[in-house]
Image (cartoon, grey):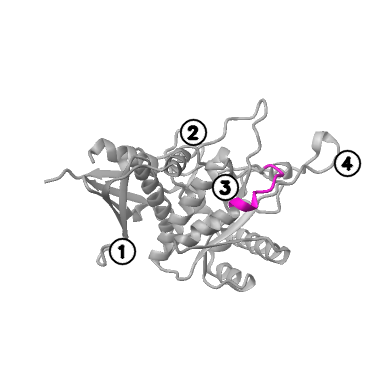
């Protein structure tokens, strides 16, 4: 492949989500392969000291790249951690000849530019059970288990752990300082989380018992909700998200990459089905709450990602345009090495 072909693939791949939109990846391309490396200069030493969540983010990018290549008619062979002497060389994707894209290949690739994280409440509409079954099968095929949180005691335990972790984070000055470094007020920012992507603290805007991470904690006033100014008005309709936990049997870098690839595939699948997602990772940030989740949910394996899935609420007249997290230009993340 030529440089411009790889640039198109990488432009699609870098639409993958990453923790705090840090985009912790570096890529190098040759005519016959693409290498993925972890960019330690974009680390989160407080929130993610082991790099687990950033490696998962790189795994999602890897899956987006494979999806883009498949839709363009390229077979691929993926090697995880191919260089024992370089732990930050996360994967190599080798081209394996021309293939005829399937309809599903095209559907998944078409979902790449449409996928975005939605932290606002969802519609009060249940996620189809057959879609959840498909997500479980497809994750399992890649060596990742997916557990819907459906039993009331599991939901209560998970909500408690998320809330406890959020409380711990909000009480940690180092965490808050790191969080603020990745919050963006400039709509043209190329990384970080745009402040207008974060729902306000108004209960009407958070009609859910699932606590979304508050990126602007301490920076806005909390106002009690009064629908239409009437204190006796009924509460807003509460969303009906599906909450799913993804995990792996092991807990090393290869497992994190597999979890990231499964996450990337899941996000493309739900986007193609008209749904959106947002992470609920606070309880997995802290080793103590992550271990407690294993125990409280009787998990065999290691939780890697917790997601809230649902249908987005339709825009109403006067609503602001949805915030879209920026991306760094391809030239900043890709190095091309000609043959020879």
Q: Distance between the residues labelled 4 and 2?
A: 38 Å
Kindly tell me whether residue 280 is visible in this rendering.
no
* Mark 2 and mark 3 residues within 8 Å of each other at the beta carbon: no
Measured in 3D between alpha carbons, the distance from the residue under mark 3 to the one under mark 1, in whole angstroms, is 30 Å
The residue wearing badge 4 is: 232
Earlier residue among tags 3 and 1: 1
Circle 4 SS class: loop
Where residue 120 appears, x then y in whole percent? Answer: 63, 42
The main secondary structure of the magenta stretch is loop
Residue 195 to residue 280: above or below: above
In the rendered image, the quadrant that contains the N terminus is top left
Disc 1 marks which residue?
87
Q: Name the residue under label 3.
A: 277
Dot placed on the residue nearer the N-terminal end, 2 or 3:
2
Name which quarter of the figure residue 230 lies in. Answer: top right
Residue 95 is situated, as x and y percent measured from the top left of the image, at 27, 49
The residue segment tinted magenta is: 123-131
Q: How far apart are marks 4 and 3 (CA)?
A: 32 Å
- Distance from the alpha carbon under mark 2 to that under mark 1: 35 Å
């Amino acid at each position: 492949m030529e440089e411009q072909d790889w640039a198109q693939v990488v432009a699609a791949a870098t639409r993958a989500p990453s923790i705090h939109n840090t985009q912790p990846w570096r890529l190098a391309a040759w005519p016959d392969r693409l290498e993925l490396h972890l960019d330690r200069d974009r680390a989160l030493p407080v929130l993610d000291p082991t790099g687990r969540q950033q490696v998962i983010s790189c795994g999602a990018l890897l899956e987006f790249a494979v999806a883009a290549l498949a839709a363009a008619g390229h077979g691929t062979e993926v090697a995880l951690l191919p260089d024992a002497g370089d732990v930050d060389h996360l994967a190599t994707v080798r081209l394996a000849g021309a293939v005829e894209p399937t309809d599903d290949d095209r559907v998944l690739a078409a979902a790449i530019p449409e996928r975005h994280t939605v932290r606002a409440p969802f519609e009060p509409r249940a996620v189809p059970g057959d879609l959840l079954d498909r997500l479980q099968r497809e994750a399992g095929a890649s060596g990742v288990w997916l557990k819907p949180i459906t039993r009331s005691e599991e939901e209560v335990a998970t909500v408690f752990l998320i809330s406890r972790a959020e409380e711990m984070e909000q009480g940690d000055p180092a965490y808050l300082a790191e969080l603020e470094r990745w919050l963006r007020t400039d709509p043209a920012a190329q990384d970080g989380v745009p402040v207008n992507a974060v729902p306000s603290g108004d209960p009407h805007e958070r009609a859910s018992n699932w606590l979304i991470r508050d990126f602007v904690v301490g920076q806005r006033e909390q106002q009690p909700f009064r629908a239409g100014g009437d204190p006796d008005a009924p509460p807003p309709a509460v969303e009906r998200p599906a909450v799913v936990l993804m995990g792996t049997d092991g807990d090393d870098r290869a497992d994190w990459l597999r979890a990231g690839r499964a996450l990337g595939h899941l996000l493309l699948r739900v986007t193609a089905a008209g749904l959106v997602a947002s992470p609920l990772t606070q309880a997995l940030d802290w080793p103590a709450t992550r271990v407690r989740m294993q125990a409280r949910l009787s998990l065999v394996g290691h939780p890697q990602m917790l997601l809230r899935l649902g249908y987005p609420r339709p825009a109403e007249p006067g609503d602001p345009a949805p915030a879209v997290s920026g991306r760094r230009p391809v030239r900043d993340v890709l190095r091309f090495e000609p043959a020879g």
